Image (cartoon, rainbow, N blue to C red):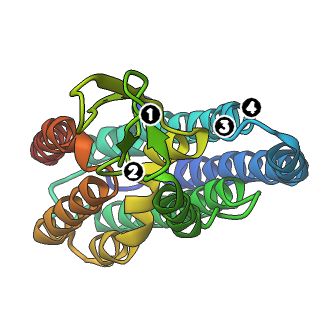
C-alpha cells in the first residue's frame, strides 16, 4: 500500500486506489444488506407463527428464536465495523501520513480526495446502520407488540376479585390478601396468627416477568427524546432511566430494593461507557 504514496505530488495510482476501495466498501455493505433482507423476509412469518402457536405464557421458544436472529444481525454489524476500521480508517490514516502537510498547497488534491472518500464511506455506513436497525425493529415487532398495560390491568382486576376469598389452613378464618404478590409469600391469619403461604397465579408471575417491559413501554417517549437529541443529552437519559425504574417499582413494589441496585449499576455503566 505504501508504494502508492511515494509520489506525493502526482500519484494517480492513489486516486485509483481510493476509487477501488470505495467501490468495494459499497459492494460489501450492499451484500450485508441483501443478506439481512433475505433473512428477515424468511424469518418474520416463522416468528409470527411461533409466537401465536406457543402456549408458554413467557413465549420462550419465540424469544430464543428472536435472540438468535438478532445475534446474526449484530454479527453483521460487527463485521461492518471491523471492515470500516481496517479498510477505511486505517487506509485514510496511512495515506495522509505520506502526503505533504495540509497547510501547504502541495498534495491538496489528494487531501481533498481522501476527505471526500472518508465522508462518502461514512455516509454509506450510516445508511447501512439505519437499515440494520430497521430490520431489528421488524423482527422485534414481527408478532405485534403485546399490550402489556391491558394484561397488567386484567391481572389487577382478577386479584381484586379473589383477595378476600382465602381461608386460614389452621382455623378456617377469612384472610384478606393485603396486596398483589408476585412470588410465594407468607400471610398471617388475623385470628390465630398462623402463617399461610400465598401462591401467586401464573398470570401474576407473568406480570413480574413482564414488569420491566411494561415500564419501558410507559416511558418510551422519554427514551425516544434522548435518542433523538443531537448531541446526546445525558440529562434526558437520566430522566428516562429514573422514570422507567419508578414505573417498574410501581408495578412490582416488592422488588423495589433489588431494582434500585440494578438502577445504580445501569447508570454507572452508562456513565463509564460515555467516558471511553
Q: Is residue 246 above or below residue 259?
A: below
Callout 2 touching callout 1 (CB < 8 Å): no
- For mark 1, does the 10 Å Cα neighbourhood hold few (<14), some (14 to 19), or many (20 or more) residues? few
Q: Quadrant of residue 41?
A: bottom right
Q: Quadrant of residue 5?
A: top left
Horizontal side, residue 59 vs residue 122: left or right: right
Callout 2 touching callout 4 (CB < 8 Å): no
Horizontal side, residue 102 vs residue 248: left or right: left
- Ranked by sequence position, the earlier of labels 2 and 1 is 1
Instruction: Name the spot of residue 29 as percent of width and height, x first.
Output: 66, 50
Horizontal side, residue 201 vs residue 194: left or right: right
Callout 4 touching callout 3 (CB < 8 Å): yes
Residue identifier under label 4: 61
Where disc 4 sits, the SS reads: helix
- Asked whether residue 223 appears in the rendered view, the answer is yes
Where disc 2 sits, the SS reads: helix
- Cα distance between the residues tagged 1 and 3: 34 Å
Residue identifier under label 1: 86
- Cα distance between the residues tagged 1 and 4: 38 Å
Viewer-nearest of discs 1 and 4: 4
Where disc 3 sits, the SS reads: helix
- Asked whether residue 209 appears in the rendered view, the answer is no
Q: Is residue 231 above or below residue 60?
A: below
- For mark 3, does the 10 Å Cα neighbourhood hold few (<14), some (14 to 19), or many (20 or more) residues? some
Q: Quarter of the image containing the C terminus?
A: top left
Label annotation for residue 193:
none
- Ranked by sequence position, the earlier of labels 1 and 4 is 4
Instruction: Name the spot of residue 238 as percent of width and height, x first.
Output: 14, 62
Q: Is residue 165 above or below residue 198?
A: below
Along the line of sight, which residue is nearer the eye, 63 or 191?
191
Residue identifier under label 3: 63
Residue identifier under label 2: 212
Amino acid at each position: 500500500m505504501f508504494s502508492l504514496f511515494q509520489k506525493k505530488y502526482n500519484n494517480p495510482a492513489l486516486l485509483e486506489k481510493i476509487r477501488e476501495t470505495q467501490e468495494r466498501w459499497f459492494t460489501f455493505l450492499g451484500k450485508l444488506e441483501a443478506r439481512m433482507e433475505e433473512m428477515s423476509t424468511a424469518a418474520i412469518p416463522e416468528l409470527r407463527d411461533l409466537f401465536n402457536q406457543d402456549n408458554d405464557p413467557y413465549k420462550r421458544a419465540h424469544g430464543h428464536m428472536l435472540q438468535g436472529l438478532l445475534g446474526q444481525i449484530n454479527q453483521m454489524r460487527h463485521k461492518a465495523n471491523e471492515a470500516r476500521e481496517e479498510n477505511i480508517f486505517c487506509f485514510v490514516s496511512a495515506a495522509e501520513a505520506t502526503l505533504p502537510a495540509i497547510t501547504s498547497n502541495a498534495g491538496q488534491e489528494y487531501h481533498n480526495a481522501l476527505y471526500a472518500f472518508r465522508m462518502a464511506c461514512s455516509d454509506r455506513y450510516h445508511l447501512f446502520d439505519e437499515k440494520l436497525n430497521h430490520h431489528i425493529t421488524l423482527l422485534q415487532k414481527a408478532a405485534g407488540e403485546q399490550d402489556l398495560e391491558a394484561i397488567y390491568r386484567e391481572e389487577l382486576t382478577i386479584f381484586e376479585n379473589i383477595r378476600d376469598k382465602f381461608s386460614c389452613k389452621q382455623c378456617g378464618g377469612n384472610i384478606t390478601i393485603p396486596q398483589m404478590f408476585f412470588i410465594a409469600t407468607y400471610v398471617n391469619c388475623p385470628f390465630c396468627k398462623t402463617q399461610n403461604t400465598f401462591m401467586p397465579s401464573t398470570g401474576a408471575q407473568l406480570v413480574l416477568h413482564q414488569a420491566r417491559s411494561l415500564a419501558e413501554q410507559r416511558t418510551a417517549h422519554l427514551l425516544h427524546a434522548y435518542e433523538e437529541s443531537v448531541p446526546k443529552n445525558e440529562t434526558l437519559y437520566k430522566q428516562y432511566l429514573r422514570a422507567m425504574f419508578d414505573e417498574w417499582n410501581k408495578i412490582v413494589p416488592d422488588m423495589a430494593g433489588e431494582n434500585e441496585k440494578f438502577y445504580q449499576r445501569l447508570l454507572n455503566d452508562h456513565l463509564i461507557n460515555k467516558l471511553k
